[in-house]
């Protein structure tokens, strides 16, 4: 399945990184397209104890605006570092929250749109292995 590149989303993440990333605490921006068509943006909140990546902040930001279902996401690093792929933790969270999510990955000059499942092959599926699954 060919997934289209949402260039408007890449632009939104790039602009958010340029405008709002500051120093070491906020160095990555993410943008997501909701199923309703809106764009939601966020930046990471670094902390040595494991502060959330921009993708995770974005999930909460979208929810706080009433959007619980995201269709496409991209992350862009500050200082013109371009599109970056989600880390392992984010891949798992994104897969569990939005199994049909499209993720735009780099390089910025030739971005690709892939499914979150492609980024996490043979994945652990939370819904299938949770405590509730054993109680059926
Ligand atoms: Zn992450």
Image: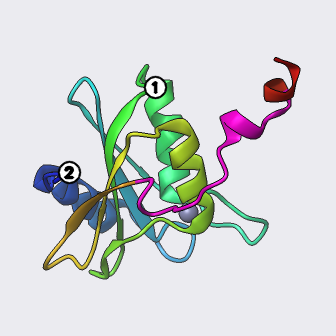
| Snapshot quadrant of residue 134 | top right
Residue 71 location (% of width, % of height) = 31, 38
Tell me if residue 30 comes above or below residue 22 in the rendering: above
Residue 118 location (% of width, % of height) = 41, 60
Q: Which mark is residue 34?
A: none
Instruction: Give 69 or 22, whichever is nearer the viewer.
Output: 69
Q: Is residue 44 visible?
A: no
What residue does disc 1 label? Answer: 68
Please give the range of residues in magenta.
116-131
Name the residue at 48% across, 36% down.
61
Residues packed near mark 1 inside 10 Å, few (<14), some (14 to 19) or many (20 plus): some
**Residue contact at pointers 2 and 1, CB within 8 angstroms:** no
Q: Is residue 54 visible?
A: yes
Of the residues tagged 2 and 1, which is closer to the observer?
A: 2
Q: Which of the image's four quarters has the C terminus?
A: top right
Name the residue at 27% across, 74% down.
106
Secondary structure under tag 2 reads loop
């Amino acid at each position: 399945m060919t997934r289209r590149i949402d260039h408007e989303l890449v632009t939104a993440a790039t602009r958010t990184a340029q405008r709002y990333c500051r120093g070491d605490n906020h160095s990555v921006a993410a943008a997501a397209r909701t199923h309703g068509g809106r764009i939601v943006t966020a930046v990471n909140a670094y902390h040595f104890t494991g502060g959330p990546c921009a993708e995770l902040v974005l999930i909460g930001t979208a929810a706080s605006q009433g959007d619980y279902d995201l269709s496409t996401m991209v992350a862009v690093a500050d200082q013109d570092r371009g599109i970056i792929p989600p880390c392992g933790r984010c891949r798992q969270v994104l897969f569990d929250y939005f199994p049909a999510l499209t993720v735009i990955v780099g390089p910025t000059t030739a971005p690709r749109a892939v499914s979150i499942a492609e980024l996490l092959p043979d994945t652990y599926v939370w819904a299938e292995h949770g405590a509730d699954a054993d109680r059926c």
